[in-house]
Amino acid sequence: MTHEIAVIPGDGIGQEVTPAAVDVLGELNIDFEFVHAEAGDETKAETGTALPEETAEIAADADATLFGAAGETAADVILPLRSIVGSFANVRPARAYPGLDALQPETDLVFIRENTEGVYSGIEDEITEGVRTLTRVITEDASEKIAEYGFQYAKRNGYDDVTIAHKANVMRETDGLFLDTAERVAEERGAEYDTALMDALAMHLAMTPEEYGVVICPNLAGDMLSDLAAGLVGGLGLLPSANIGEENALFEPVHGSAPDIAGEGVANPSAMILSAAMMLDHLEYPEEAETVRAAVESVLDSGPRTPDLGGSASTEEMTEAVVDEL
Ligand code: GGG
């Protein structure tokens, strides 16, 4: 069986780390057909649109998409792409790896981020000069869906601690609905859970991440808390993610285009390769996914490392080391 994979490197270091993931996948005994497509800042400069129709169609028709990174055109690229694949859940694992000098070596968290609404749904306006608005939509349906997914994920992956992040004491209507719905889901499932105000949660995650497992979050909170967790384990170069839909999915590192190092060939490919491992799980190749994760883990422990991890290896050298471990 051939799996058609859309490959959209996007901007900046996305163009350096995406080929690394494709190289690793190419070493496996799985029949992939990679269909390359353009999107992002450069594409907009060349064609006038950041997400050409052809790219959207390739992502919609593929069995899964690998996406690198979005730059200034993030709102025109990554948010529509998530919608094109019908993604409702953004799964962001953040774990500390042996051998790395992590700030919090006991970290093993998974953020289950609502992926369709909240402030990222993009309903912004300028009502008069100097006054702009942002309308935030939260629905019971989307809150129920992400809570169901979060509790199922925790059960399937052996996480005992589930926390519902919210700020319902201030955003009473919107986060209030998110919280009430997620608590109802937990109670219907007979699941244990905690709730946490997202600002206090940020502090607790920084100080005692080992007390948390799965964190179910509204959209923006999930984006921010997962970046915080990246800081606990060694940086954004280590965090993969999966955008899960009912029938399609897109996999991307949590990091963005990193214009400060783009073009230097030193971006850490781990997050992108680990995102490809999440894609292997999704396509039901759990053994191959585990093999790829083990190879990355081994290189992180004792192989060549990129400068963000204190080493001097290039993206290519680190990728070759992962390939050699397979
Ligand atoms: N690879 C993910 C990426 O490009 N991130 C940049 C970004 O702006 N992300 C916003 C989001 O994840 O919603």
Image (tube, helix red, strand yellow):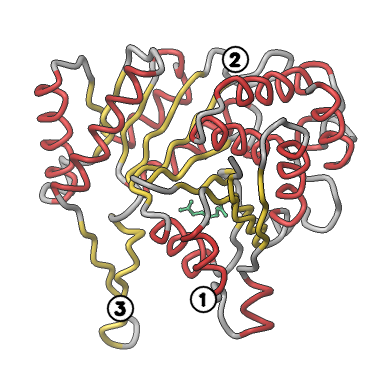
Ligand 1 near label 1 (Cβ, under 8 Å)? no
Name the quadrant containing residue 218: top left
Residue at image coords 82%, 37%: 307
Query: Which of the two marks, 3 or 1, is nearer to us in this view?
Result: 1
Q: Secondary structure at mark 1?
A: helix
Establish if 1 lies above or below 86.
Answer: above
Q: Earlier in the sequence, mark 3 or mark 1?
A: 1
Residue type pointed to by label 3: Asp
Residue at image coords 55%, 69%: 73
Establish if 191 lies above or below 27.
Answer: above
Residue at image coords 28%, 68%: 134
Residue type pointed to by label 2: Pro
In this view, the residue in front, 12 or 175, is 12
Name the quadrant containing residue 136: bottom left
On screen, residue 322 versus residue 249, left or right, reads right
Q: Which image quarter holds the N terminus?
A: top right
User: How far apart in space, not on screen, are marks 1 and 2 (Cα)?
Assistant: 44 Å
Residue type pointed to by label 1: Glu
Q: Which residue is mark 3?
A: 125
Q: Secondary structure at mark 2?
A: loop
Q: Which mark is residue 53?
A: 1
User: How far apart in space, not on screen, are marks 3 and 1 (Cα)?
Assistant: 26 Å
Q: Earlier in the sequence, mark 1 or mark 2?
A: 1
Q: Secondary structure at mark 3?
A: strand
Pinpoint residue 129: horizontal percent, then vertical percent.
33, 87
Q: Earlier in the sequence, mark 3 or mark 2?
A: 2
Q: Which residue is mark 2?
A: 105
Pinpoint residue 85: horizontal percent, then vertical percent.
42, 55
Specify few, some or many for label 2: CA neighbours under 10 Å numbering under 14, 14-19, or 20 or more.
Answer: some
Pinpoint residue 220: horizontal percent, then vertical percent.
37, 49
On screen, residue 305 versus residue 18, left or right, reads right
